[in-house]
Amino acid sequence: MRAIKKIIALATGATMLGATIMGAMAANLADFPSPLLIKDTTFDADIVYGVNADPSDIMGLVDAVAAISVVETGVTVEGGDEVAIEGDSWKAETSSKLLELGESLSSIQSTITEDELNALADGTFTAKNDADYEQEMRFSGNVVLSYEEDTDEDVVSTFLTLDDDMEILNYTLTFTTSAESDVDDGELEDFEDQTIKILGIDYTMTKTELSTDNYALELTMMGGALLDTMEQGQVKTYTLDGKDYEVEVTYIGGLTESTCKFKINGETTDSMVEGDTYTLADDTDIGVREILEEEAGEVTADMIEFYLGADKIVLQDPNISDRADFGDMEVGDETMDEVEVDLAASVDASGEFLFESIKLIYTADDDYWFGPGQKLSEKVDEPEAMINWDIAYEGMTSASMESIELIPAGDEQAELNIEVADGDVSIPVAYADDNTIWLGEETDRLVLTRGTLVEKDQFFFLSTGTGVPDEGEKSYVLQYKGADNSGSSATATLNFDNLAGDSDPIERSFNKATGQATLTLGGQEFTIVNKSDATEDDDFNISISGGATEGYLVTDGDALILIAQPGGDNSTVQVRITEADPSGMVESDVQSWINLTLNENEDEIAIDVDTITTGSLITDPDDNDVSTQMTVYGAKVTVTDESSGPDKVEIDWPSEQLVGQAFVTSGEVRATIVGSVGGAVLQKVTIPLAKSDDDVLTVDPAMNRNNYLLVGGPCANRATAKVLGSGTSWPGCADGFEEGVGRILVKEMNGNVAMVVAGMTALDTTRATRVLKDYQSYDLSGDEVEVLGTTATPQTVRAVSS
């Protein structure tokens, strides 16, 4: 019973994607999992197992619930995709700090403890005393989120990077009260055969050696996947990672030191003493924890305690009192070159050993790049040295993208293509000719300066706000198409083309008496003034005032663009792009600039990227004509060297800042995407702990107050019996069931729904849960289907006619 509850807790305690049972609609298996079990991302059904259930029923339930851990919904989630890690992990972020490009893990949080990672839980080591200890990991500043080229793989992307010979992190286990031991002939007699949990792994100290001459210390510890005790001559079969191992103890004995031998799947080990390991032909290790050799006349047999799938580590320190003199770590029989060991301890005046701490310092032995979906353990030469920790990188968050382009329109013209309030627009930025570069086109200029004459057919743009426009302000790109002035009338008509999208032309009435007109765009009023002497002429010149500072544009995605011609000497045009509001858009509150320059080069326009705040352009290793870089905000800049003309600059501008998703993990973990994926949305909720049939029937004896997901037939689950109206004792509990046939059915109970997954035997139930696990592969419909087969693998799934 305890094992069953433990499995249930593991199965349902994980975070999963949400569910609720369908409401008033008739229950139909075609609606599994959504909306039958999923609605509005809320799971409101009780998961019920039988106290008499076979463990395979419980494991089948684990599979069935796991099947709905990733489900598409139609809800729109603000923001981009985010990766969540299921398992023991800490994401490198806090409530006030995110991992930006160029930042290190230590800049987010320099140290993590049990509050962030379960594997770092406090513990107690039982030696001569009960010594409490704490664990922590302290990051160096060398694990950095970078955009660069992985020169090993010739790939340019975002990576977590580490430089050769730089410290990664250090792990420390610190005793809050010194762990004490008597020393007997160089051995720490109170430490041996005692267990300590390091990074979530139980290790037994099998051998301790202390040199009283120079206080060198060596600790041999052993853990493993499987621990058992056998007698000499005994044979047992174990399954490890899906493979069977037949283990026989062939010898236990020895004159001066106890030794033993094993035969495993026909392979005989060397003679082994306590603390030894032996590597089998398939690279599986067997390790001896303790040899219990009985004296003559004793009735009990010699015994050996051993690990199959053994993990043996040896920690050495040449001087326990010198913090700067580090030792080595061995895993198996190999010295770990990437780890230095510091064992802090002392021996008091009475000769008692006092253990203070274990520190493992991890250093990179090469340049490392680990990209999206990769882990540090996949890059290092000795991943076994990491014991039970890792660093995973799951890429940048994502967001919808806006395109910004500065591209040639022929050899002499450059256009800026952006999206503004009214749609996409192409702005004629610059024209080059005869060692001169002009704003606008060859014949029609782009006017930036407020108060400057705007002539017919010239271009200008207006932005709402004041000063430098902020996030959320709007820009409008217009072309003045002249004025219709009838002469005798008191007003004239001003005509403008709105260049964005399919916008309609704009007409405004001009008051001749005041010499002004107003133009309201985006809720902002702009003033238009006649700048011609001949007030009765058509197409008179104008000037415009109001709004944000001249030269600034705000795109629909809140990119702030400044177009300027420094000094007015017609030698260059500058285009500068940054975030409209760094305090609201960039976590570090620091703007990242993309600076572009246009100039004339032999009667052609030249488009150059001067600087990008985060670094220089990186040449694509597969195409020398393409270079890229990424800003702290997550804007990706691509420059293409066009052989037949000027370069082209393209910028993918995100709707919100992209940040790195880095995790420190322990043990087995799984990454799940949460957010929008191709228009679909994935969201998760926490599934409640499963309940036993006893608990549920105590509260709801009629089984009609809630929605239920039940596993196991009436013989194993009394709640199922109540829903189906069956008995709970043999043979009545088997009514409606037959061997070789599993059942999946839904039944309405007083407006609620109960879903039953069951069979006559545990094998039949397992077969039915496997259909639920792979529901997308089967045609589930109606209120019941049968799952036929002779093994756990479904052979036929058929609907049951009403």
Image (tube, rainbow, N blue to C red):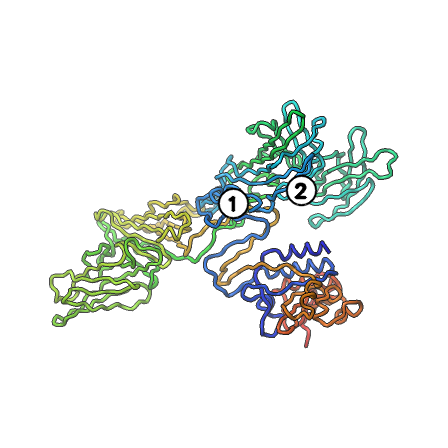
- Residue 645 vertical placement versus 38 (above, below): above
Q: Nearer the viewer, residue 425 or 218?
A: 218
- Badge 1 is on which residue? 370
SS class, disc 1 = strand
Residue that appears at 87% across and 38% down: 299
Residue 659 locus on image (x, y percent): 46, 50
Taking the image as drawn, is residue 630 in sight? no
Amino acid type, residue under disc 2 in the picture: Asp
- Kindly indicate the quadrant of the structure image that contains residue 688: bottom right
Q: What is the residue that sits farthest to the top in this orientation? A: 213
- Residue 162 vertical placement versus 20 (above, below): above
- Badge 2 is on which residue? 202
Q: What is the residue that sits farthest to the bottom in this orientation? A: 802
- Kindly indicate the quadrant of the structure image that contains residue 404: bottom left
SS class, disc 2 = strand
Residue 337 locus on image (x, y percent): 58, 34
Residue 137 locus on image (x, y percent): 55, 40
Quick one: quadrant of the N terminus?
A: bottom right
Residue that appears at 59% across and 33% down: 341
